[in-house]
Amino acid sequence: MRVSVVDAGSNTVRLVVADVEGGVPLPVHTVKWKLRLSEQVGPDGALGDEAVEGLVKAVAAAEATARHWKAAGPLAFATAVVRAAPNRAEVLRRVEAGAGVRMCTLPGETEAALTFLAVRRWLGWNAGPLALLDIGGGSLEVAFGRGRLPDFAASLPLGANRLTQEFLAAQDPPAPGEVKTLRRRVRHELRDVAARIRWEGPRTAAVSSRTFQQLARLCGAAPGRQGLFVPREMRRRDLGGAVRTLAGLPAAERAGLPGISAPRAGQSLAGAVVGHTALKLMGLRRVVVSPWAIREGVLLRYIEDGAGWWTDVSAADNAPPTARPAALRIAASPV
């Protein structure tokens, strides 16, 4: 069976077409469209007409590509930038009308749970009690669990792009005081979640997402061209050094550092501050870098729990949290 997933994030829309025989999602084709939706958000958080039209065109192109590759789906979802928009319902309606694809938004805790599942499957049961951190453009997802799905999951407004716009946009490179203010905000937001992770005492801590992958490369991890199966780790002390390096450079010069791409150079410092602060507060000295994340998590839930699971997810998009089916509520544990 061949399935496709479309993920509309803060920077890009990504399509993954995968064969799912044998219970493992094996990618056969991937493509992305750079929209930078987070840079097109109005003062009230709403997405403007131009941004929505770009999203419609990208999803339509993704659907056509999936059909070309003879894939079912696509299973289409949007993350924090659309989820938080006050005109979210209108955005989703226009995507369905213009692209013929029913897109949904996922609660942040559900994103954390799906990413946890992907990382658990990648690392295996040998990882033991597992803590996960995943930083996107709009939010930071944190999860902990001993089994297939997490016992605890949380989503915090600590996305790399969000914090860059809020704290580090005044000058380039930012003033030391701006970085200190950002770190104080991150510590405040993470206090309770970090205490829970420390209390749980995970055997393995893992990170996922493009932001963490680039930071790990900056900290000495193997480059992506060496393949998925090369073990990659990142040490907290190295990430602390990366914070100092990034803070002293303008965005254009950060793009010349190992692993830091030009499109993400501007938000790399905020991502590094969030990552380093989280590891310090949680008492984690070293993390494993997982190449699997939210898209693989969606595919795995679809494989393991059937198409009905996704039907419940997409149908519940406008439902209040207490009315959401178990497919969405399974990991929405309170902090």
Image (tube, grey):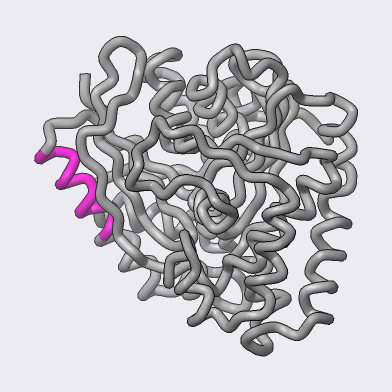
Q: Going 27% across and 58% down the picture, which residue do you hit? A: 58
**How many dots with numbers?**
0
* Viewer-nearest residue: 217 or 205: 217
Q: Is residue 62 magenta?
A: yes
In-image side of 40 versus 99 (left or right): right
In this picture, residue 11 sits left or right of residue 72: right
Instruction: Report x, y in % for residue 224.
Output: 38, 47
Residue 147 is drawn in which quadrant? top right
Q: Residue furthest left?
A: 68
Q: Position of residue 283 (x, y in %)?
A: 84, 39
Give the image location of residue 46, x and y in percent. Answer: 54, 69
Q: Nearer the viewer, residue 86 or 18?
A: 18
Q: Quadrant of the C terminus?
A: top right
Residue located 82% across and 48% down the image? 280
Which of 124 and 89 lies nearest the eye of the viewer?
124
Q: Residue furthest bottom?
A: 171
Between 301 and 161, the one lying in front of the other is: 161
Residue range (magenta): 58-68
